[in-house]
Amino acid sequence: MPTCWINVLLWRIVDDVLEGGLEEFAKAYPYGTVLLQIREPSSWHASLHRWSAMDKKFSGHPGCRKKGVTPHPRATKLMWFDYYEAYTKRVRQTMELFPTVNYVEVPLSKEIGPTTDNIFGFSQESNCWIHKNSNPGRH
């Protein structure tokens, strides 16, 4: 099994960026790395909606609603596009405040695995960034 190093694995709910989670990470790990995989807002929303209607689940989640983090449950696609663009903008602006943190932004594509392996210096055989999807019909 290949060795894939990750100094810190930071998986938090999407609102942590807006609630200061990214700043906390940057302060705790001033030489850490933040990887943001980006895509077109319409493609992101289509994926979010297709994946068990996650847009509805996010917007209906009491924690997200209470904080006003996500658009309301009846939000239009354009509202979700605006949300995604504001979110990515917030990540970029936050990273500008922490110049010692490595910030890597990679467009999401079918080549994301080899591209990310190359960025981080993994061999192509490492399979550190392989595609994962629990829906067998989507592989």
Image (cartoon, grey):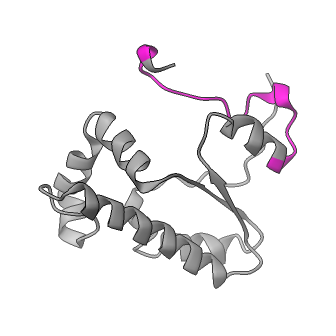
85 magenta-colored: no
Q: Where is residue 15 in the image (x, y as percent from the top left)?
A: 37, 64
Quadrant of the rendered structure where residue 128 is? Answer: top right
The spot of residue 72 in percent (x, y) is 16, 62
Q: Residue 130 at x, y = what percent?
A: 66, 29
| Residue at 22% from the left image edge and 46% from the top image edge | 57
* Residue found at the far left of this picture: 74
Q: In this view, does 13 lie above or below 68?
A: above
Q: Quadrant of residue 78?
A: bottom left
Q: Quadrant of residue 71?
A: bottom left
Prevalent SS, magenta region:
loop
* Relative horizontal placement of residue 85, taking residue 71 as reference (left or right): right
Question: From the image, which quarter does the N terminus lie in?
Answer: top right
Q: Is residue 101 above or below residue 106?
A: below
Give the residue drawn at x 70%, y 36%.
113
**Which residue is situated farthest in the bottom direction here?**
97
Q: Give the camera-side residue of 88 and 121.
A: 88
Is 33 above or below relative to 89?
above
> Is residue 121 shown in magenta?
yes
**Left or right: 61 with respect to 109?**
left
Number of on-image labels: 0
Front residue of 138 and 5? 138
Q: Nearer the viewer, residue 26 or 51?
A: 51
Magenta range is 119-137
Apparent side of residue 64 relative to residue 14 in the rendered image (left or right): left
